[in-house]
Amino acid sequence: DGASTLMAHALDPKDGSSLWQVPVTGALVGASPGWLFVAEPAGTGRLTGRLSAVRCADGAVSELPAPARKFISFLAADATRVVSNSFEFGFNQQQICVADIATRASHCLEPTDGKLPAYNVSGAVLRGDELWFATSHIGAHNLDDRPDSWVLRYDLKGQRFLGHSEPLTSNGLFAAAGAQVVTGFGTTGIADFGYVLGATGERLASLPLAKAPRQVAADATRAYFATYDGSVAALALPAPGEAPATEQPVAAQALPEPPPPADLGWQKLASFDAHPPRAASSGSMGEGFLYDVDFLDADTIVVGGNDDRAAVYGLDGKRRWRSPGLRKDVQRVVSCLDGFAAQTYQGDVAVFVTRGKGFRQARTIKAGFGWAFGVTAACDVLTDTFDGDFTVWDAKTGKSKQKFRAPGVFDRRGVRVTGSLVVVSEGDELRAVDLADDLSVAARWPTARNAHGGGLTQAWLLRDGRLLREYCGPKACVIEILAAGGGAVVKTLTMDTTGGGWSPTVPSMIAASPDGASLAFFRRQLDLTLVDVATDRRQPLADLAGPQSGLVQATFSRDGRRLAIVGHPKGWQATILERKAGR
């Protein structure tokens, strides 16, 4: 009938000859000495509903006990046992089960010792008669950066909890390392770490990671952490009996005295609702929120928000046009030629062009999830995957035009397209790559991964060809502007971020005027600040137009005379600033 069959296939490592081949009901999800484990699809996305064990010696398949909940995920296994986590959407708690592969007998427990919240299970490892597992809230920590995860130890013979670790951050992964356990933790908006834990869960060593870990492993001397940006970090395992490693405190950043607030010649032109006060995404119906804004011309803006639409407004606050529903939050909007491109939360890109007094959707690009998004002057679209594979999509056909790989060393939310140029990192330099000229390199700037007490978070070109790059640490973000064509630093601006709510690895919201003379700077829980680059004079938005309610996004008009800010004063509102004549 043309249907495909999944097969488990064993090959002799000596000559590659087939040892056995057997049909299975699901995809490979794990392995242990002597066994492979496959999971049967549950009919809902990528979720799975049943585990089976395939014996490596002869291909014999053993179906494991059915999960107590609707869905199941593989956690860990050894030569005789397999650990799984069963769950369903709703109010039933998750359940961890340890099953004997041969007898199918299983023991199940809830993921809490009664003292900690029963959060989601994110990883596990078997250590003799002990089961170690991690629970986490699985929340994005750019909204709440408090640690909310723990490693718990459970005695399988005595069927009792033995203790838990100090609070950590989300998404624990595990690997056994003799008497020690290697684990990696990290998630959106908070610093990522790899840890070595001792026999009772105490921390013996730690290693800061540039990005969240996806896999962990260990040999006799080292622990390894593979992070989602494609890099691998190594940490030496402490010798037996060695005292726990002391963590070196982060050196405080030396902050210059901030300049007093100044009048930079901006004035409030208008504030208006640019979005319904309620959302429409995923049935949440929460408060309306604008994610992005761009100028179509000096008197018109396009916005995107969580009503799943893009909309066009005049600066008088009147809506000129609104798109049909795009199914998910519209998180990015960028103008180009006679229209604009809008990217949704799930990665789809809708390209709109002028039609009469409104716009029509010319094409849809199914780009998929990623971090980077940019639009060239010719309306070609740049997207990436979480692994750092970039695609340039043709403006006219909506088809893939060219691909390249650039996992880089800074957060790819800090990638932007200027004209046809995009800045990517390669080794110890930043390169301006021309998307319209077969990816030729237009300029190179030697660049350290860490400087000014922080790490590189973003890099992109101003319209005159100068490079803007940002380093953020625990107390400050430093913006450097470098001469065009690979030149040296010509301006340094230090922004005090004390009290800010984002991890130092997250790029700041920075908008630059077309001539690079003015910047708008924002980090969560801080005021948006206007900066005159030449003089370093600054003006907080609150002093000019009143306080903002939360997150904001800003962009300058093409002549640099106006600044549009969304999320001010409320999340669904927009404020327009205008520079006074003669300033």
Image (spheres, rainbow, N blue to C red):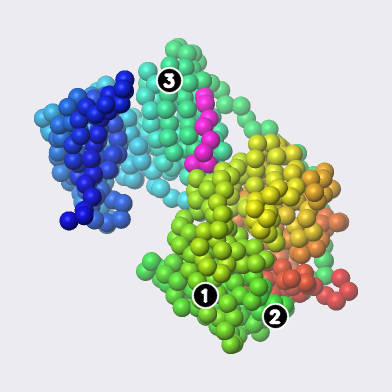
Residue drawn 86% across and 56% down?
535
Marking on residue 299 = 2
Q: Nearer the viewer, residue 374 or 102?
A: 374
Which residue lies at the image location 65% right of the left edge and 51% below the top edge?
439
**Which residue is label 1 attached to?**
362
Kindly identify the amino acid type of the residue bearing the numbered disc 1.
Answer: Ala
Residue 248, percent across and down?
61, 27
Q: Tag 1: Cα neighbours inside 10 Å, few (<14), some, or many (≥20)?
A: some
Distance between the alpha carbons at the discs numbered 1 and 3? 54 Å
The answer to whether residue 181 is above or below residue 491 is: above
Three-letter code, disc 2: Asp
Decide if residue 46 is on the left or right side of residue 182: left
Magenta-drawn segment: 228-235
Of the residues under marks 2 and 1, which one precedes in the sequence? Answer: 2
For label 2, the crowd category at 10 Å Cα-Cα, with few meaning under 14, some 14 to 19 and many 20 or more, is few
Q: Position of residue 18 (x, y in %)?
A: 24, 29
User: Which residue position is annotated with label 3?
Assistant: 219
